[in-house]
Image (cartoon, grey):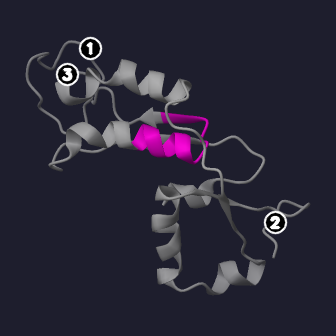
C-alpha cells in the first residue's frame, strides 16, 4: 500500500516498516521486502523498530520480549548484510515497465474505500508511482 505514496521524479524511502514475528514467513519477509523495493526502484527502507526501550540495558540479549524488536531477533538481524547487498547491488533490477497512477482532485474526494485494490498487487509485478502536475497537484 505504500506504493501509492511514491511520486514520480521524487525520492522515496519507506519508513517504519516491519513484519512482527507472528507470520510463519517472518524470516523471509525482510528479504522479500528488499527485493520488492528494488523492483519498484525505491531509495530506502527503514525497519521499525530496532529496540523498543529507551534504555540500552533493560532487556535481555538472548530473549525476544517484544515482537517489534529487531535487535535480538536472529531471523532478522543475521540478514541485514544480505539485505544491504541485495538493495545496493543489482540482484533485483527495477521493473522494465511502470504503472502511473493518476487521480484528479475530484477523484481524491470521491474514491470509494476499495479503490486501492490494484495498488495492493501492482507493486509485486511492476513498478508503481503517482504522477503530479506542475503545481504539485495530481492530474489526469
C-alpha distance separating marks 3 and 1 = 12 Å
**In the depicted view, which residue is nearer to us: 83 or 22?**
83
Q: Evaluate whether residue 126 shows in this view.
A: yes
How far across and how far down the image is residue 129, in percent?
A: 66, 58
Q: Which circle, 2 or 1, is nearer the viewer? A: 2
- CB contact under 8 Å: marks 2 and 1: no
| The C terminus: image quadrant | bottom right
Which of the two labelled residues, at mark 2 and mark 1, occupies the earlier sequence position? 1
Q: Nearer the viewer, mark 3 or mark 1?
A: 3
**What is the number of the mark on residue 72?**
3
For the residues labelled 2 and 1, the Cα–Cα distance comes to: 44 Å
User: Residue at the location (47% across, 75% down)?
Assistant: 117
Q: Is residue 61 left or right of residue 38?
A: left
Q: Is residue 87 left or right of residue 23?
A: right
Question: Where does the image place residue 139, in percent across and percent down from the top left?
Answer: 82, 72
Mark 3 → mark 2, Cα distance in angstroms: 43 Å
As for residue 39 lying within the magenta part, the answer is: yes
What crowding class fits label 2: few (fewer than 14 Cα within 10 Å), some (14-19), or many (20 or more)? few
Closer-to-camera residue (92/47): 92
Residue drawn at the location 61% of the way across and 56% of the way down: 5
Give the magenta-colored segment's residue range.
33-45
Q: Would you say the residues marked 3 and 1 are in contact, meaning their CB atoms lie under 8 Å apart?
A: no
Task: Identify the disc placed on residue 56.
Answer: 1
Amino acid at each position: 500500500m505504500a506504493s501509492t505514496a511514491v511520486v514520480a521524479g521524487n525520492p522515496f524511502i519507506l519508513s517504519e516498516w516491519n513484519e512482527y514475528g507472528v507470520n510463519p514467513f517472518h524470516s523471509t519477509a525482510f528479504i522479500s521486502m528488499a527485493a520488492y523495493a528494488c523492483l519498484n526502484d525505491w531509495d530506502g527502507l527503514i525497519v521499525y523498530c530496532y529496540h523498543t526501550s529507551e534504555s540500552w540495558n533493560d532487556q535481555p540479549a538472548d530473549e525476544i520480549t517484544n515482537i517489534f524488536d529487531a535487535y535480538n531477533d536472529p531471523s532478522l538481524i543475521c540478514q541485514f548484510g544480505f539485505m544491504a547487498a541485495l538493495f545496493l547491488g543489482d540482484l533485483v533490477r527495477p521493473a522494465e515497465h511502470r504503472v502511473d497512477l493518476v487521480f484528479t482532485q475530484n477523484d481524491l474526494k470521491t474514491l470509494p474505500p476499495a479503490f486501492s485494490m490494484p495498488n495492493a498487487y501492482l507493486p509485486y509485478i511492476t513498478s508503481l508511482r503517482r504522477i503530479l502536475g506542475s503545481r504539485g497537484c495530481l492530474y489526469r
